[in-house]
Image: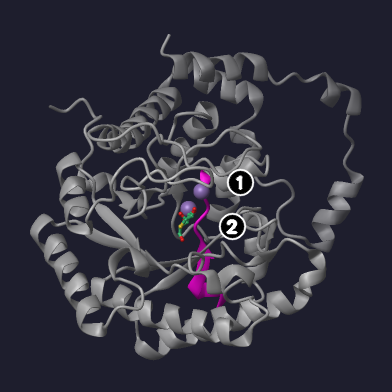
Amino acid sequence: MSDGLTPRPEHKFSFGLWTIGHPGRDPFGDATRPPIDPVDFVRGLAKIGAWGVSFHDDDLMTFGAPESQRRAELDRFKAALAETGIVCSMATTNLFWHPMFKDGAFTSNDRNVRRLAIQKVLRNLDVAAELGAPTYVLWGGREGVESAASKEPRDALDRYKEALDFLCGYVRDQGYAIRFALEPKPNEPRGDTFLPTIGHALGFIQMLEYPEMVGLNPEVAHETMAGLSFYQGVAQALWQGKLFHIDLNDQKIGRYDQDLRFGSEGIKDDFFLVRLLEASGYDGPRHFDARPYRNDGGEGIWDFARGCMRTYLVLAQKAREYDLDPRVQEAMAKAGVPELAESTVGRYSADSAARLKAESFEPDRLADRTYGNEALDQLVIDRILGV
Ligand code: GLT
Ligand code: MN
Ligand code: MN
């Protein structure tokens, strides 16, 4: 069967242990389905054609349990990876669930909480290296405030940087082939989160001791919550060589973090996103950080997972058809899409500046040009709707 819509390992689809198996707990209600054992999870992934799995330390090894128990939990997981060929594509730390993190982790006002948070990451970096995970995600869920009076934000950024610099130092020292990926989010669970958007995180990275070791793990839902175009943010991350990983899901604009099935909401932005990822040479995981609807269960949770991958593959196919369509190419030429790829003035020289100053333009004729964006956009809509 090669309809192009069957997920295969080469598509690099991955899921976090906390996603398909999410028990459906929310701030207003308890679990609606049982958790999945990590071993069954990995076997389930192999069955649906996924390639990779990601984990938080606490998803895999019981927090606070004796070392022997944690070792046994890790070994079972490793055996499941070996049995199925599923790859460990990313690791991360739970720095948000335990009540000690209520004031933050790297940016808690309590210095001992900060030290423990870094210790927790150091220990899980050893696990990540053992499992061969090339990317280590840092989502600062609790790094933020409700009251602006509670923290001096410049001190918080100093502490955030101190933690990142220390962790990079450790990875270098151990010789681990691991890079860090920051995951921005504007708010929730905190009222305001530090590093709230892709842009804030990109700026922060430039201030670090080892900026080349740190990139981004942007998430569809998080930029959309802030009313921003995820597509434009990802494009800038790619442009800066900082797209280390990606969290695909979906979201209604302006709501709480919904983590919906990929492609279930913002279909047009998703179309351009998939087109961008496929054209860009991004060869990292297509990682789904989403969860099934709370009123689903049983086989429904695997329907959810299959749906994420299917929609990605459908959009990739539509994007290829779109780019090959002669009407699209013609409309793009009229819009000047290829023209934007041409250099404007080249590198500065006194000569070229003098030449440009002497050149004469006809502003009214330039203003007369039309770009045909209505027709071009309708071709996008027709292609997505399949007519
Ligand atoms: C949590 C969060 C996600 C992050 C995960 C990594 S955990 O579920 O909502 O966006 O990617 O810590
Ligand atoms: Mn989310
Ligand atoms: Mn995420």
From the top left corner, tell me how far across and down residue 215 is, in percent: 52, 65
What's the residue type where badge 2 is placed? Pro
From the top left corner, tell me how far across and down residue 239 is, in percent: 57, 54
- Earlier-in-chain disc, 2 versus 1: 2
Residue at the far bottom: name it. Answer: 173
Residue at the far left: name it. Answer: 83
The colouring scheme, among rainbow, by chain, secondary structure or one colour, is one colour
Residue toward you, 292 or 360:
292
Which residue is rendered at x = 53% and y = 69% of the image? 99
Q: In the image, is residue 334 above or below residue 224?
A: above
According to the picture, the residue beneath numbered tag 1 turns out to be 223
Q: Tell whether 218 sits left or right of 321.
A: right
Q: In the image, is residue 1 above or below residue 41?
A: above
Q: Is mark 2 on a helix, strand or loop?
A: loop
Residue 250 seen: yes
From the top left corner, tell me how far across and down residue 385 is, in percent: 45, 14
Q: Tell whether 7 sits left or right of 313.
A: left
Marks 2 and 1, how far apart in space?
8 Å
According to the picture, the residue beneath numbered tag 2 turns out to be 184
What's the residue type where badge 1 is placed? Glu
Q: Tell whether 176 sits left or right of 361.
A: left
Q: Is there CB contact under 8 Å for labels 2 and 1?
A: yes
Does the segment drawn in magenta span residue 90?
no
The quarter of the rendered structure image containing the C terminus is top left
Which residue is rendered at x = 64% and y = 83% of the image? 110
The boundaries of the magenta stretch are: 210-220
Q: In the image, is residue 4 above or below residue 23?
A: above
Q: In the image, is residue 379 above or below residue 337?
A: above
From the top left corner, tell me how far across and down residue 338 is, in percent: 59, 34
